[in-house]
Amino acid sequence: MKIAAIATWILLVAPIAAHAHGDAVHKKAAVDPAKAEQQSFGRAGNPKAVNRTMTITMSDTMRFSPANLTIKQGDTVRIVVRNDGKLLHEMVLGTEEDLAKHAELMRKFPDMEHDEPHMVHVQPGRTEVMVWQFNRPGEFRFACLVPGHYEAGMTGTITVR
Ligand SMILES: [Cu+2]
């Protein structure tokens, strides 16, 4: 079961991650919104269509602030993610199930690198931005998947309605 999950990860996600690494992390805005992959929790947003900006801070107490977001369905949100800590943190959007699986992989492969439109890795003292369109209603999550952080409770909720 676990091996199958890893095999699935390697087959489906690794090529995408490798491809994404061809671009610099800071080029997230270069995602063509028309070709953005639809996820259950939304899709990469068009930076020109942003109608809301939110700032989320991350700290070494393993918390996001704010940790609970409510978003109107259809909004394209510029999410400004600031790392106030001294450790690397990241913000990854997803469903609870996606994030739990991903966290498990990160524990097994701590050096695994990945970059996709629904995540930002933020060095200490830095700020990164992602643009996401929440075009599907539901209850979603975000989390920091640096090994140990998710387990320490570094998660938040997103309600889209
Ligand atoms: Cu973290």
Image: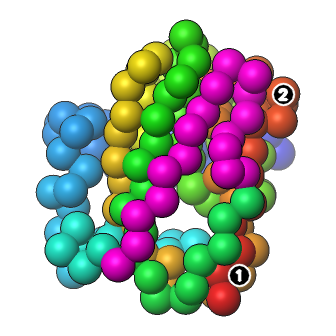
Residue at image position (66%, 73%) is 70
Residue at image position (50%, 78%) is 134
Residue at image position (74%, 27%) is 62
Nearest to the observer: residue 16 or residue 24: 24
The residue type indicated by label 2 comes to: Ala
Q: Position of residue 69 (x, y in %)?
A: 66, 65
Where does label 2 land, which residue? Answer: 152
Kindly report the distance in space between the C-alpha atoms of the residues bearing marks 2 and 1. Answer: 25 Å
Magenta region, residue range? 51-67
When asked about the image quadrant of residue 126, the answer is: top left
The residue type indicated by label 1 comes to: Gly
Task: State whether residue 63 is above or below residue 111.
Answer: below
How dense is the environment of label 2, judged by Cα within 10 Å: few (below 14), some, or many (20 and up)? few
- Quarter holding the C terminus is bottom right
Residue 114 in the figure: left or right of residue 33: right
Residue 127 in the figure: left or right of residue 124: left
Residue 138's label in the rendered image is 1
Q: Position of residue 154 (x, y in %)?
A: 75, 36
When asked about the image quadrant of residue 121, the answer is: top left
Mark 2 secondary-structure assignment: loop
- Quarter holding the N terminus is top right
Residue 123 in the figure: left or right of residue 70: left
